[in-house]
Image (tube, coloured by chain):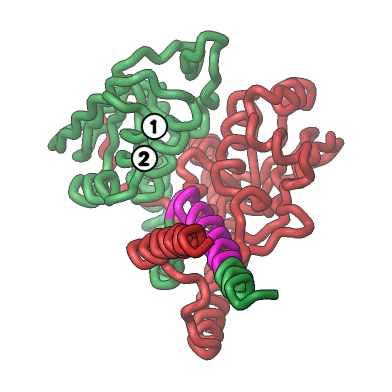
Chain colours: A green, B red
Amino acid sequence: MTKKRIYIVIVVAILGIFIVAQGRWFTGENSVFSRDTQSNVFQEITILKNKNEDLKNEIENLDSILQQLKNQNSALEAIEEEIEKYKKLNGEFPIFGSGVSLTIDAQLTTPWVIDLINEFFNSGVQAVSINGIRITNNTAGFDTLPHGQILLNGSILPSPYIFDVIGEPSLIVDVLELPGGILDRLERAFPGMIIDTEIREIIQMDKI
Amino acid sequence: MKKGFIFIFLGVGLIVGVLLVRQLVSGTPIDEIFPVDELQAKEDLFKDFLDEQGYLQSRIVSLREQIETAESEIEVQSEIASISFLDDLKKDVGLSEISGKGVEILLDDSPFALREGSEVSDIDLVQAADIRDIVNILYAANVQAISVNNQRIIATSPISSVGTTILINNAHTAPPFTISAVGDKDLILQRLQNDSLLVSVFERASKNELVFQVSVKEWVSIPIYNGDFKVNYLNLIN
């Protein structure tokens, strides 16, 4: 074998190693970016820490209710407080509060609507409605009709989609507008989509 | 021959250069940059938080049971009509155990899949979106209650992922995922067997990249919600 051929073999071998390494790198890159969010140790720990704080607060609240119930004078008051709390949640009573109104003008598909609503609840919002229909345990799931329209509780949801959200407004906007967040992904999936985000002092939701 | 040899080297050099530049400009984090002790510290911290979370959730369930008992006693003693209204409200928000006929869905990663390390690939892992889609289909089939790995799902339950970790109600949940639902089994099956509603799941299951099994159950029990409720931004319109 001549010297030149040996050089060629060495160079081709090095190139092969590079191509294989690069291919594996690209595979890893795809897997990282195609998921909901990028893996981040600190984010995972922060979520767990915050969740545990919320659970501790709930325990304090439940402990307080239990003490009130054990006392004849305060039992009725505790029951009334519980009733008021769950009336706010079950969707059969109209509610209001501050929050954000997000209008999306695009032909969204069911999975994207599910993802967006999930993102709202993930950011700690307390109530969500889409085109006036509040999402509660008594709301049926989203269905897709043959022509791609979205059906919720027997109503076809037309575009523009209006998502009314009650919760901490600045937090909701921050989460929505995160680089690589849900709105970024929606804009990539639906080029030309028109989004309008409005912080509102009062958002009203009717009973379902 | 000499000229051809130079062209080969130029071509190879160019390709290597392109690959190197691509590598250098990529912002992708390298999976295995954490030293072993940092990974161990992460796992330890995780375990501590998860142990605490398990304890807190069981404490919440226990307190809700005690409240339920206390309220029943008050109802018996004083016949307060509002207690039965309160019970209905609790049922609506997921604070009553629901049992009956239904289905159980097993969703698992491919047997060859890895959730940790540099070889992680999304294709053969259960993703949060898969669970969200199935939960939505179950809601659309008008089920009475849903749980994932014994964690009650309510309308406000976020199902999300951070990297390869899946969080349900912001609590860490690991595969295999058992999704249980109480409801009309025929209607549920009709929906779940419609591959146009779960395109990605059916496609990956057919290639053994995902385990997806549905079984009808005569008895399914869904526990009460063990998380917190926040209502400080909500006001009733009287």
User: Can residue B118 be seen here?
Assistant: no
Question: Which residue is under mark 2?
Answer: A185
Point out the stretch of residues depicted in magenta.
A15-37
Magenta segment main secondary structure: helix
Spot occupied by residue A162 in the image (x, y as percentages of width and height)? 29, 24
Number of marks in picture: 2
Q: Is residue A133 left or right of residue A13?
A: left
> Can see residue A44?
yes
Residue drawn at the location 51% of the way across and 34% of the way down = A137
What residue is rendered at 42% in x and 51% in y?
Answer: B229
The image position of residue A12, as x and y in percent, is 59, 66
Residue extending furthest toward the front? B1
The type of residue carrying mark 1 is Ala
**Amino acid type, label 2:** Arg
Instruction: Give the camera-side residue of B90 and B209.
Output: B209
Is B112 one of the magenta-colored residues? no
Q: Is residue B190 above or below residue B81?
A: above
Q: Residue at x 67, y 63 (%)?
A: B114
Identify which residue, A61 or B99, lies in the foreground: B99
Asked if the residue at tag 1 contacts the one at tag 2, i.e. Cβ–Cβ closer than 8 Å, the answer is yes
Q: Is residue B138 left or right of residue A99?
A: right
Tag 1 residue? A189
Q: Residue at x 39, y 44 (%)?
A: A119
To the question of a shared chain for discs 2 and 1, the answer is yes
Does B88 sit above or below residue A41?
Answer: above
The percent coordinates of residue A21 (x first, y second) are 56, 66
Gap in angstroms between the C-alphas marked 2 and 1: 6 Å
Image vertical order of residue B72 relative to residue A155, above or below: below
Q: In the rendered view of the protein, which quadrant contains the C terminus of chain A?
A: top left
Dot 2: few (<14), some (14–19), or many (≥20) neighbours within 10 Å?
A: few
Pick whichever, B15 or A122, lies toward us: B15
